[in-house]
Image (spheres, rainbow, N blue to C red):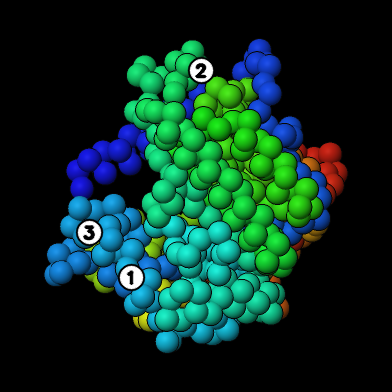
Amino acid sequence: MKRSITIALGMLFLAQSIAVLGQQKKTEKVELKYGSHRIGKRDDAIMERWRSYGLGQFIHWGLYAIPGGEWNGKQYNGAAEWIRSWNGIPKSTYDSLIYKFDPIKFDAKQWAIEAKQMGAKYVIFTTKHHDGFCMWPSKYTSYTIKNSPFKKDVVKEVVDAYDAQGIDVYLYFSIIDWNHPGYQAGNAKPNPFTVESWKTYNPFSSKEKKDKYEEFKKFTRNQLVELLTNYPKAKGLWFDGTWDPAWMKQDGFTDSLEKELRALRPGLIIGSRFRADENGSRHFDSNGDLMGDYEQGWERKLPNKIEDVHGNDWDCVMTVPENQWGYNKAWKGHIKTSNELIEMTAKSVSLGGNFVLNFGPTGDGSIRLEEKKLASEIGNWMKTNGDAIYSSTYAGLEKQDWGYFTKKKGTDKINMIIFNTPISGTYRVKLPAGTAIAKSYQLASPSETLKVEEIHANEYFIHLNKTKGATPFVIVLETTKKVRNGDNNYEKAKT
């Protein structure tokens, strides 16, 4: 177990180290053959729809849901979906779980209904995690749902059910595949890591391993084409395991593969973690340009200011416990509340991103009760306040202590999403010069106009006289251009 964890941590460190190289824009451009395919944001309707989501759902589900982070009464001290890498369970024993996978309570239609009630606009579903088990009947391996007792095409059922509810589907796919004989993680990273050391780095310890990896690359390409062919309703691909040094070294192959996938599905959305350039930079190429359609560096963390997102589209994927994606019988440590998750959603949208909440169904296909409760509470809030999340974005205003601003796209409406109610019951707002508040009200009761007091040029108090509350709420500001009569109503103090 220690060796596996060390390798995994080493790969993660390499990925983070390499990503840092590209996070700052270079003043002098480096000539790249396999860098970013586009400078700046996509401006097509498909990507604009992605920007409007606000809230999404992630589902991690596979064979790892059967042990649920436990084997023979012992708890695996890691993320449940990684349990096959633990030396506490024989690999062959784990792989034989395929013959026990029969989720009799799985109901994709009910999942989709509950996701819609939560307010999710898109879902990311695990077609294949690191263990290599395919949740669709892939013709390129026998390690699929078809050869389990369940037999049904889970991916198809999920895609069809969510699409019927108006929820867009994105397919998660792990490059890491512990079941494939040609897969390997690659040799230890160059130390120290530099562009020069990366150029000469050889991830394979022998020609035999290199040749086997070539077969693995063909296999991976075939499965990705198969997914896009089988499930035309899917809007995009979400990749994992691409920090693997052996994969990162395949810059020419991955560049060509991305182009092939996009040609196969015009408008396909792929995030920033699919590939590396020839210098080993991921997420951002060696010139600091985003590689993909949106930034995926925000896993279980959020930016704090607009500058942190580099002007890119982005989303945050988040777990309920601190680091459990697949089903784990024992949730340990801090468990997030619905108010915390709503605040993360609001913060994400206020900085121009989307927020995606993870669910880990059990081995029988049911959603655990704790997750159902959170989804219901979030959904109840979204029913009243979702207008401040959907099709909303960064408002360009100075953040205040009471919460977050979002701006409704295509309107002059600004939303104040309140999480910290001032004792005074008044909420400070600072608007850009030349902007005034025409009207203010709570989103929950738009017919009740709130008192607005201008306390300084372009600074206002919104009087609500609400000093406490169990749930966050939204105040709407309808803004207009300010017309001054030439008089200055505010005189500086004389000293």
> Is the residue 493 above or below the residue 474 in the image?
above
Amino acid type, label 2? Lys
Under circle 3, the secondary element is: loop
State the image coordinates of residue 492 (x, y, percent, origin top left): 62, 32
The three-letter code of the residue at mark 3 reads Pro
Say whether marks 1 and 3 touch (CB < 8 Å).
no
Q: Which mark is residue 97?
A: 1
What separation in Å lies between label 1 and label 2 (alpha carbons)? 41 Å
Tell me which residue sits at (71%, 67%) in the image: 233
Q: CA distance from mark 2 to mark 3?
A: 37 Å
Question: On residue 90, which mark appears?
Answer: 3
Residue under pointer 2: 199
Q: Nearer the viewer, mark 1 or mark 2?
A: 1
Q: Residues within 10 Å of mark 2 (few under 14, many from 20)?
A: few
Q: Amino acid at mark 1?
A: Leu
Q: Position of residue 136 (x, y in %)?
A: 55, 69
Residue situated in front as seen by the camera: 108 or 411: 108
Residue 293: % across, % down: 67, 44
SS label for mark 2: helix
* Disc sitting over residue 400 in the figure: none
Which residue lies at the image location 81% right of the left edge and 55% below the top edge? Answer: 45
Front residue of 189/325: it is 189
Examine the image and state in which quarter residue 309 appears: top right
Above/below status of 301 relative to 464: above
Q: Residues within 10 Å of mark 1 (few under 14, many from 20)?
A: some
